[in-house]
Image (spheres, rainbow, N blue to C red):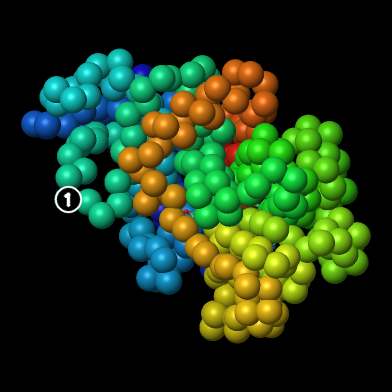
Amino acid sequence: MTLNRQLCLSRNIRQGEAVTSELFDMKETAIPEPGEGEFLVKTTALGFSPAQRAYLMGEESRFHTPIEIGDIMRGRGVGEILKSNNDDYKVGDIVACSTGWQDYSVQSGDQGDLLVKTLQKVDNPQEPLYLHLGILGSSAFSAYFGLLDIGKPQKGETVVVSSAAGGVGSIVCQIAKIKGCKVIGIAGGEDKCKWLEEFVGVDETIDYKNDDIEAKFKEYCPNGIDVYFDNVGGDILDFALKNIALKGRAVICGMIATEYQEPPLPGPRYYYNVIYKRARIEGFFVWDYFNQFPAAEKELIEWYKSGQLKSTEDVFKGLESAPDALQAMFDGTSCGIKIVDF
Ligand SMILES: NC(=O)c1ccc[n+]([C@@H]2O[C@H](COP(=O)([O-])OP(=O)(O)OC[C@H]3O[C@@H](n4cnc5c(N)ncnc54)[C@H](OP(=O)(O)O)[C@@H]3O)[C@@H](O)[C@H]2O)c1
C-alpha cells in the first residue's frame, strides 16, 4: 500500500439517525513520516465502543469531545510498528492505541503527563491480532476489572449481566462462570438468548424485549441478585435494584439505553434498596486500571488457551465497513465484540 486511506467525518449525525458510510468521506493521503520520538503504526484491526456515536454529534456531550467535520474518525486499533524513532517502541512491536479509522498513524509513546493512558504495548501478541481489541483487549479489561474488582463475585453467588450478548457482557458472563457463579444474561431477542446459552454458556437468559423481567428475576434469583453488571441503565437497572440481594453489588459499566437522552432521565425508582439491602452501586472507568492491563492480559490468555474463555468477536472486513460495525452496536443485529479486520 502506498497511500493512507482515512475515513473522515463529512457531517454530523442527526438525532435517531443510523451510523452509515454517508457520514464519512474516504480520503487518501500520503503515508505520514514519524518525527523525533515518534513511530509509524500500520493498523490491522479496529475496535468499537458505543461512545463513538457521541463523537459524531457535533456537540460536547456529558463524557465525550466531538470530532470536527473533516477530521479522521477517532477510534482504537491494533497494529504493527513499521518505522520508529523511539527506543522504547521498536519496529515489529505490536501496539493497541488510538489509531483512528485509517491505515497508518503516527504515535508518540510519551504518555507521561496524560491523565488517561491508552497506548498499550502488546507484550505477548496472539493471532489474530484483533483479539487484542476483543477478548484480550479493552472490552475484556472492562469485564475483568468491573466484575472482579468492583463486583467481587464469590463462588455460588448469582450474577446478572445486562447487554450480556454484547462485547463487554459476553466476557463478563464467561468470567463469572469461571469464578463459579450462577449467571443470568439479559439480551434482546430469542436468537441472542440462544447464543448466550449455547455458546457463551450462561445458566439462564432473560429476553428483555419479550419476557416479564421481574417475573424472571423472581424465578432465577429467588435469593436476590448478588452482583448486577450493568451495561444499559434505564428500566433494567431499576428492576435489578428492586431485586438486589442483601449486601448486593451493582457495577455500573455503561448505560447504552439512556446515555444519549436529553434531558437526562431521573434516577432509578428502587434506589431505596441501597439502604434496605445494604447494597453498593459503584461505577468504574477501565482506563484507571491501565497499569494492571498486563496482569489481566496474562490471565485472559491463560483462560483463552485452556478453552475457558471463548472468542466472541464479530468480525467485519475492511476499513470501509467501520460505520456498519459501529451501527451494529445500536441496532442489536450482532452478538459479541465488534471488530473490523483490515
Ligand atoms: N466504564 C467503562 O470503562 C466502559 C468501558 C467499555 C464500555 N463501556 C460501556 O459498556 C457498555 C457495553 O459496551 P460494549 O462495547 O460491550 O457494547 P455492547 O454491549 O456490545 O453494545 C451493543 C449492544 O447494546 C444493546 N443495546 C443497544 N441499545 C440498547 C437499548 N436501548 N437498551 C438496551 N440494550 C441496548 C444491544 O444488545 P441487545 O440486542 O441485547 O439489546 C447491542 O447489541 C456500553 O454502554 C459502553 O459504553 C464502559
Residue 189 vs residue 252: left or right? right
Q: Is residue 86 above or below residue 100?
A: above
How many residues crowd around disc 1 within 10 Å: few (fewer than 14), some, or many (20 or more)? few
- In this view of the protein, can residue 124 be seen by the observer? yes
Assign the N terminus to one quadrant of the image: top left
**Camera-side residue: 190 or 272?**
272
Residue 206 vs residue 111: left or right? right
Q: Is residue 198 above or below residue 264?
A: above
Residue 317 vs residue 8: left or right? right
Q: Write down the residue under mark 1.
A: 113
Instruction: Place residue 218 in its image quadrant.
Output: bottom right
Q: Residue at x 74, y 60 (%)?
A: 225
Horizontal and vertical percent for residue 316?
A: 60, 33
Looking at the rendered structure, the number of numbered marks drawn on it comes to: 1
Q: Residue at x 67, y 26 (%)?
A: 308
Instruction: Place residue 251 in its image quadrant.
Output: bottom right
Q: Residue at x 22, y 51 (%)?
A: 114
Horizontal and vertical percent for residue 64?
A: 40, 63
Instruction: Place residue 242 in its image quadrant.
Output: bottom right
Q: Is residue 330 above or below residue 75?
A: below
Given the image, on which type of amino acid does mark 1 rest?
Asp
Residue 45 vs residue 308: left or right? left
- In this view of the protein, can residue 5 be seen by the observer? no
Horizontal and vertical percent for residue 107?
A: 24, 35
**Camera-side residue: 328 or 263?**
263
Horizontal and vertical percent for residue 168?
A: 59, 46
